[in-house]
Amino acid sequence: TVIADRRPIRELPDELISQIAAGEVVERPASVVRELVDNALDAGAAQITVRLLAGGVRLIAVEDDGSGIPEPELATALKRHATSKIASLADLESVGTMGFRGEALAAISSVSELSLLSRTAAQPNAFLLDGRSGELRPAARGVGTSVEVRELFFATPARRKFLKTDATELAHCIEAVRRHALARPDVGFAIWHEGKLVEQWRRCEGSSAQAHDRRLADVLGEDFLERSVLVEHRSGNLTVRGRAGVPDAARSRSDWQYCWVNGRYVRDKVIGHAARSAYEDVLHGQRQPVYALHVAVDPARIDVNVHPTKIEVRFRDSREVHQAVRHAVENALAAPRAGATNGAAS
Ligand code: ADP
Ligand code: MG
């Protein structure tokens, strides 16, 4: 068929561009939670509180005690491609922050009612910006930022229809925070739903390894910690550390397979395959190993700008990563277990 009524090419209005972009970044309330917690961590927060109503559909509020946003920059924070985290292509080559695309707040505010309340240490008071009206007024708050996101997808009913029950959306929101919490034991997290505290993970003191173990036990349970071995491996300037479950701890589902690259939770085929292959000889059938692995690599050797949600990364040398992860886990599983060596060794 011939398109008889072809319309002229037009540049789309900003609002519509943001709404289209939001389709990639904001799939459900948990995506908003992830982005807002990313921002709080980038701002150096020590304590992050997430408050939700109706699984996050009616309200997602994330409060932090980070650096805050200066009043003159509040409106800019909501603009597309506006960021304080990179300024040049060179910066993009070695991103050290969770964010850098400058599109999360713009995308979220295009599909919700968003407000920003923030105060820097240099300001005597906070300011509140209403994303919809653009109204800016003085308000009360300690140093840090509160972002409130109400009525997600109210203007995009097609998207709203894809949302599951409140309980399911809540579970996804908690999972999003869990991924951050496991990577950052030095930060305290609390999640409230409908006025009730549903999760609380306090800041963990001590050395990094101890703090990570403590946090792992708090988030995934003492059992995870007790039935796992310490993974510690360095090759070149690549390190792999964390915990790998003993074969007995394997599950029927692959839900406890966590990995982070430079502190960013990722779903990575290379790491996943390497970790699974380390269990090749000790795990049979459909059993899924459990692990929580942190890979640290020179930021210049990965590309984090692969996916709008940054859930994937690309390694410059994925073979190197595969080998390191596989060796790290294999060695950890082969070593006699600390604390369980009495009489067992021979
Ligand atoms: P990005 O994180 O990619 O820079 P965002 O849209 O998520 O983009 O945020 C835009 C900017 O707003 C950030 O670069 C940062 O300067 C500021 N910002 C957002 N959230 C916070 C926060 N919780 N604390 C301090 N600054 C923030
Ligand atoms: Mg961000």
Image (cartoon, rainbow, N blue to C red):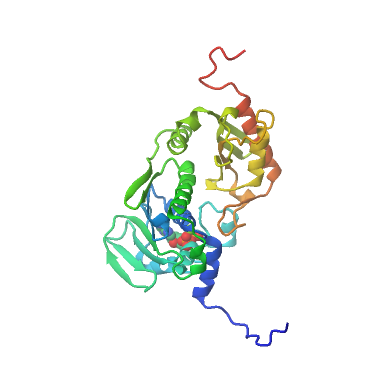
* Percent coordinates x, y for residue 342 in the rendering: 53, 14
Foreground residue, 78 or 177? 177
Q: Residue furthest right?
A: 1
Residue 289 found in image quarter:
top right
Foreground residue, 228 or 144? 228
Q: Is residue 168 left or right of residue 68?
A: right
Question: What's the residue at 52%, 45% (across, down)?
Answer: 263
Question: What's the residue at 55%, 45% (across, down)?
Answer: 262
Residue 139 seen from this side: yes
Picture layout, residue 90 above or below residue 290 = below
Picture layout, residue 240 above or below residue 68 = above
Quarter the C terminus occupies? top right
Q: Is residue 31 left or right of residue 143?
A: right
Foreground residue, 103 or 279? 279
* Percent coordinates x, y for residue 144 in the rendering: 35, 55
* Percent coordinates x, y for residue 202 in the rendering: 37, 40
Picture layout, residue 27 above or below residue 229 = below
* Percent coordinates x, y for residue 79 in the rendering: 46, 69
Quarter the N terminus occupies? bottom right
